[in-house]
Image (cartoon, grey):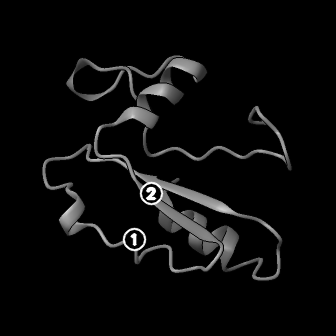
Amino acid sequence: MGARWVQTQILAQYPSAQLRVYAVWLPMLGGDRREAWNGTNMPDSRVIHFWDGDLELGQWFAKEVGGYEGLRGMFIIFMVQMRYGKLSLHPF
């Protein structure tokens, strides 16, 4: 489940839902770079986009959640979704 799924199955299906989506984009594949990214696959106004060019957030989540050894031999989490309750510090 990626960004397109979140857009079509959650945001488009529930346009009045009071929620926020924080989309963090990482350069994980060969052509991934900030200049080529535009975030248009999640145009909903409830989405806030971030670019993590240094993979810091992906590494932090992998360490905190655990079990994510990814590309380039690094522990990193990407192409996932996490849901948090209001004012929650942990996924549910």
- Of the numbered discs 1 and 2, the one sitting upstream in the chain is 1
In three-dimensional space, the C-alpha distance between marks 1 and 2, rounded to whole angstroms, equals: 9 Å
Residue furthest out toward the left: 30
Q: Would you say 84 lies left or right of 47 here?
A: right
Dot 1 falls on a residue whose secondary structure is loop
The amino acid type found where label 1 is placed reads Gly
Name which quarter of the figure residue 20 lies in: bottom right
How many numbered marks, from 0 up?
2
Residue in view at x 34 percent, y 36 percent: 55
Q: Would you say 37 lies left or right of 49 here?
A: left
Residue 36 placement (x, y as % from top left): 20, 68
Q: Which residue lies under the disc numbered 1? A: 39
Residue in view at x 59 percent, y 74 percent: 8
Residue 2 placement (x, y as % from top left): 49, 56
Dot 2 falls on a residue whose secondary structure is strand
Disc 1 versus disc 2: nearer the observer: 2
Q: Which residue lies under the disc numbered 2? A: 50
Residue 66 placement (x, y as % from top left): 55, 17
Q: Would you say 47 lies left or right of 42 here?
A: right
Residue in view at x 84 percent, y 45 percent: 87
Whether label 1 touches label 2, CB < 8 Å:
no
Determine which of the numbered discs, if any, sits on residue 65 in the image. Answer: none
The answer to which of 13 and 43 lies nearer the viewer is 43
Residue in view at x 39 percent, y 28 percent: 76
Name which quarter of the figure residue 17 lies in: bottom right
Residue 3 placement (x, y as % from top left): 49, 62
In this rendering, the answer to whether 42 lies above or below 16 is above
- Label 2: few (<14), some (14–19) or many (≥20) C-alpha neighbours in 10 Å: few
- Label 1: few (<14), some (14–19) or many (≥20) C-alpha neighbours in 10 Å: some
